[in-house]
Amino acid sequence: MAIKINDIPPEGLTVTLADKLDLFDEGTADTPFTAQVTVKAEGAGIFHVNGTVEATASLECSRCLKRFTFPIKEAAMDFDLVPEGARKLSAEHELGRSELDTEFYRGGEIEPKEFIREQLLLTIPMVPVHSPDCKGLCPVCGGDRNERDCDCRTELPEGAASPFAALKTIIKPEKE
């Protein structure tokens, strides 16, 4: 649902959205979300956006590769929307704090799904795990250690030289 700029009154416009989006560009809109978004004109084509969004994302555990649902509760949105190309900056321009919270729009419409998707991506952990106790996959056989223990050895047999032992002769520890 696009918001037409001409439809935003001076006191602002609040919309409630409920839809699905393609969070990871996989070609499937499988992440349901609800959002409460307020857009208020600041002048010169600049708008201030604030609100909250909730969603349920389907993620892959970074340890065992199983899919799990990750609830996102009340992710906050608070930024300015500026027309694309409105600010001409030199290559050496250092961004100020207020410029870091800026999004851009094109034409006479604002597409909330674009910035909602970005806000959801910012709330997802960089290394998602389905449980803090996840044991992950065995590096030798690839079996899921959460389902069964394997007899694979990940330590060197007693008395075996480490493949990194040669580095000890090259790198000398600094003396204090």
Image (cartoon, rainbow, N blue to C red):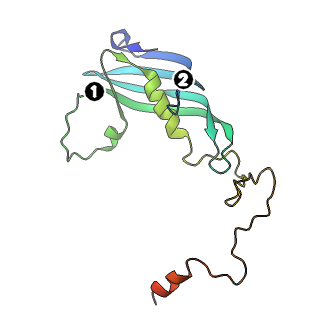
Query: What percent of the width, then of the height, locates residue 126?
Result: 54, 47
The residue that appears at 46% across and 85% down in the rendered structure is 170
Query: What percent of the width, then of the height, locates residue 70?
Result: 64, 37
Looking at numbered disc 1 in the image, what kind of residue is underneath it?
A: Glu
Seen from the viewer's position, the closer of residues 161 and 24 is 161
Instruction: Farthest residue to the top: give it.
Output: 7
Query: What percent of the width, then of the height, locates residue 35?
Result: 54, 23
Look at discs 1 and 2 and give the one toward the viewer. 1
Can residue 173 be seen?
no
Q: Secondary structure at mark 1?
A: loop
Can residue 60 be seen?
yes
In the displayed structure, would residue 44 be above or below residue 173? above
Are there few (<14), some (14-19), or many (20+) residues within 10 Å of tag 2? Answer: many
Instruction: Return the mark for residue 37.
Output: none
Instruction: Return the mark for residue 35.
Output: 2
Are there few (<14), some (14-19), or many (20+) residues within 10 Å of tag 1? Answer: few
107 displayed left or right of 140: left
Residue receiving disc 1? 84
Question: In the rendered structure, which disc, 1 or 2, sits on the residue that comes first in sequence?
Answer: 2
Q: Secondary structure at mark 2?
A: strand
In the displayed structure, would residue 138 be above or below residue 128? below
Q: Are marks 1 and 2 in contact (CB under 8 Å)?
A: no
